[in-house]
Image (spheres, rainbow, N blue to C red):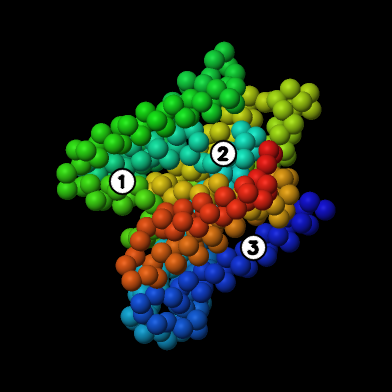
């Protein structure tokens, strides 16, 4: 029954994501129809084939498409849509895990300082530029992991990591790292605008290279988190009850915390700090599909991908493009307040 519901909801949301993505690819300053977009997508489609020289990738379609259309859709819009889908997928997935982990409806992927740590790394790279592979994303990713690991070390004593201590340590580390960011911004000089723009969260200058970096990390760790969905359900009963039911509580908590932190770090490193996706999307899906994480994790992830692709389309359609983080906050905050006023947000 659960598997059937999961497959049905996931298939429906995946179809919605494809529809939103194709619609988004037609929108922009250049007027490009759905048929042209579909032809570009099919032309870029490659399938594996075994030839005389071994495994090769073959493109089975070769529709005639103007070179300008091919460039706009295939090199500009599709990488941005794909990266938005990956980032939204990751943030909503991590948000659903964090809310279940902390048994707190206000938890989101940044609660243990991952996003703030990434921001420190990114701003440090902008203020003190160095020539390193992957540059800013690498600095942001490492900063996020250091922050998460630091919070875990502070909160762990005697091999146990109390959730309340972890939450408070995350708040304190976020405040400290916020001060570090403010200090660096004061000395950012010509890099101030770049740093502030990154902190707002955006998908401008997305490339297939960034998609290829983030997608494998998110995909592999999604499978790991899905494997622990049942354990996450049991943890909602409380740690003592979970231990009684055969769950290795501390080991499970470490895996959930580390995995969701890396998922968040991978997303923030390629997009900046995009708020509210990991907070409101799991809430919305919990109202629709219920609290069972075996359904909630995949549906939240797919809904997050759709939400971010749609909001980024709005962000780039105005007279002047704005960071998508502004759109998600502008839409997310009123909606979340509406849920609060109608008592739809409650303890897990």
Question: What is the C-alpha distance between the residues marked 3 and 1?
Answer: 32 Å
Quarter of the image holding residue 120?
Answer: top left
Q: What SS does tag 2 mark? A: loop
> At which x and y percent is residue 327?
44, 58
Residues at badges 3 and 1 in contact (C-beta under 8 Å)?
no
Q: What SS does tag 1 mark? A: helix
Residue sitting at 25 percent across and 34 percent down?
Answer: 183
One can see residue 342 in this view? yes
For this rendering, which residue is in front, 80 or 56?
A: 80
Question: What is the C-alpha distance between the residues marked 3 and 2?
Answer: 24 Å
Residue sitting at 46 percent across and 48 percent down?
Answer: 275
- Whichever of callouts 3 and 2 sits on the residue coming sooner in the sequence is 3
**Label 2 Cα neighbours within 10 Å, binned few <14 / some 14-19 / many ≥20:** many
> At which x and y percent is residue 46?
49, 69
Q: Is residue 66 left or right of residue 249?
A: left
Residue sitting at 69 percent across and 39 percent down?
Answer: 348
For this rendering, which residue is in front, 82 or 50?
A: 82
Point out which mark residue 107 bears.
2
- Whichever of callouts 3 and 1 sits on the residue coming sooner in the sequence is 3
**What residue is pinned by disc 3?**
13
The residue sitting at the left extreme is 189
The residue sitting at the front extreme is 341
The residue sitting at the top extreme is 158
**Label 1 Cα neighbours within 10 Å, binned few <14 / some 14-19 / many ≥20:** many
Question: What is the C-alpha distance between the residues marked 2 and 1?
Answer: 27 Å
Q: Nearer the viewer, mark 3 or mark 2?
A: 2
Up the image or down, 14 lies above or below 177; here it is below
**What residue is pinned by disc 1?**
136
Up the image or down, 78 lies above or below 279; here it is below
**Label 3 Cα neighbours within 10 Å, binned few <14 / some 14-19 / many ≥20:** many
Q: What SS does tag 3 mark? A: helix
């Amino acid at each position: 029954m659960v598997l059937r519901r999961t497959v049905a909801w996931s298939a429906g949301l995946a179809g919605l994501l494809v529809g939103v993505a194709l619609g988004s690819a037609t929108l922009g300053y250049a007027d490009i129809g759905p048929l042209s977009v579909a032809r570009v997508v099919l032309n870029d489609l490659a399938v594996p084939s075994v030839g005389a020289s071994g495994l090769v990738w073959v493109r089975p379609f070769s529709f005639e498409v103007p070179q300008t259309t091919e460039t706009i859709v295939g090199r500009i819009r599709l990488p941005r849509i794909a990266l938005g889908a990956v980032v939204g997928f990751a943030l909503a997935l991590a948000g659903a895990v964090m809310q279940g982990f902390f048994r707190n409806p206000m938890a989101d992927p940044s609660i243990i300082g991952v996003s703030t740590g990434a921001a420190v790394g990114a701003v440090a790279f902008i203020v003190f530029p160095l020539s390193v592979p992957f540059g800013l994303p690498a600095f942001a990713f490492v900063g996020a992991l250091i922050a998460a690991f630091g919070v875990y070390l502070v909160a762990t004593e005697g091999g146990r990591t109390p959730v309340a201590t972890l939450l408070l340590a995350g708040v304190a580390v976020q405040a400290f790292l916020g001060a570090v960011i403010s200090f660096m911004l004061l000395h950012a000089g010509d890099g101030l605008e770049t740093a502030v723009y990154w902190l707002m969260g955006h998908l401008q200058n997305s490339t297939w290279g960034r998609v290829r970096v983030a997608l494998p990390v998110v995909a592999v760790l999604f499978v790991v988190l899905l494997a622990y969905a049942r354990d996450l359900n049991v943890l909602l009963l409380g740690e003592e009850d979970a231990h009684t039911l055969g769950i290795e509580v501390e080991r499970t908590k470490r895996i959930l915390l580390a995995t969701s932190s890396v998922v968040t770090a991978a997303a923030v490193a390629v997009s900046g700090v995009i708020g509210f996706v990991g907070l409101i999307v799991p809430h919305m899906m919990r109202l629709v599909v219920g609290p069972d994480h075996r359904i909630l994790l995949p549906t939240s992830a797919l809904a997050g991908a759709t939400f971010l692709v749609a909001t980024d389309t709005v962000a780039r359609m105005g007279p002047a493009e704005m960071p998508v983080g502004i759109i998600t906050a502008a839409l997310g905050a009123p909606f979340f307040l509406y849920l609060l006023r109608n008592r739809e947000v409650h303890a897990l």
